[in-house]
Amino acid sequence: MNELKFLTAGIPIKAEGKGYKKGFETLKEMNLDGLEAEFVHGVRISTDSINEVQKAVSEGFTVTCHGPYYINLNAKEPEKVEASITRILDTARAAKTLGAYSITYHAAFYMGNDKNIVFDRVAKQTEKIIQTLQEEDNNVWIRPETTGKNTQWGNLEEIVKLSKMFEKVLPCVDFAHLHARSNGSYNTYDEFCKIFEFIGNELGEVALNNFHAHLAGIEYSAKGEKKHLILEESDMNYKDLLKAFKEFNIKGVIVCESPNIEDDAKLLKDYYLSL
């Protein structure tokens, strides 16, 4: 990736449910750079939609994919683990078909288990996923996402540690989730810089030049994430975050997950370009 792109999490609201064609028209009108296809309830997309997304990618839009919510690589039941693997693989297959840049998903819950045991289980299943995708000649980036609650596997250290083990795995850093999970930390310029320093030191330039971030305003409690908010109605310090993105010359995508996805994506892009 040669620059930082600003994407919406799903089809813009202004497209009024008229699908990807209208969605990309809206993005073009707003000078936004693409979207994250949301496969939240299952990896299903019509042939017409595939054609529209492929056309948009060929015209220069950037697309990423979000895997279904029903993923838990640490489930007690083996069949649920296998179903989770299949959902991740299907997301990656759809991404390849669409010409997408990378996929992201929430990988696991701790389920009361020791964190080291859970890490080993997630790593074992990730190895299977990567092996299958290699056999299928699928080179899409696979990105477990930093999660917003302490019951969910996926703090920054865990995601980076997993990324060190596999060539095609890199983090999806959800800055709102980090902020909520820590009950208010990860919200100053210095803290944002430390995130980029940590990722750069551990994973190298490739991670900073191929970044995948999520951002929104967020409501949280001591237990972590409650719900996404519009940026200006939250305490999310997005201006200093974007200054840190600029300082480290981060390239890749920022996907806006605020309730007003395209308006906040535009707010972010305009502020970033003003720096």
Image (spheres, rainbow, N blue to C red):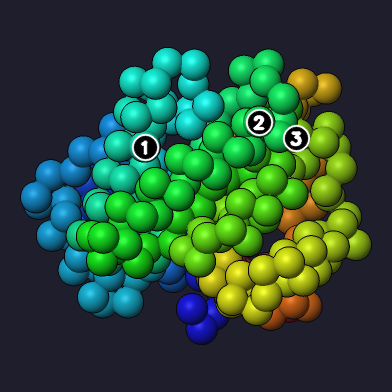
Picture quadrant of residue 61: bottom left
Hey, what amino acid is under mark 2? Answer: Ile
Distance from disc 3 to disc 2, alpha carbons, whole Å, reads 24 Å
Task: Tell me the element at label 3.
Answer: helix
Disc 3 target residue: 180
Q: Name the spot of residue 4 as percent of width and height, x first.
A: 56, 73
Q: Residue furthest left?
A: 47
Query: What residue do we see at 74% from left, 49% from top?
Result: 157
Q: Considering depth in this image, is 192 or 35 the residue closer to the camera? A: 192
Q: Name the spot of residue 219 as percent of width and height, x first.
A: 72, 30
Label 3 crowd (10 A; few <14 / some 14-19 / many >=20): many
Hey, what amino acid is under mark 1? Answer: Ile
Disc 2 target residue: 117
In the picture shown, does residue 61 fall above or below 38?
below
Q: Which mark is residue 85?
A: 1
Q: Considering depth in this image, is 55 or 266 the residue closer to the camera? A: 55
Hey, what amino acid is under mark 3? Answer: Ala
Query: What residue do we see at 48% from left, 31% from top?
Result: 73
Q: Name the spot of residue 138 as percent of width and height, x first.
A: 29, 63
Q: Considering depth in this image, is 145 or 229 the residue closer to the camera? A: 145
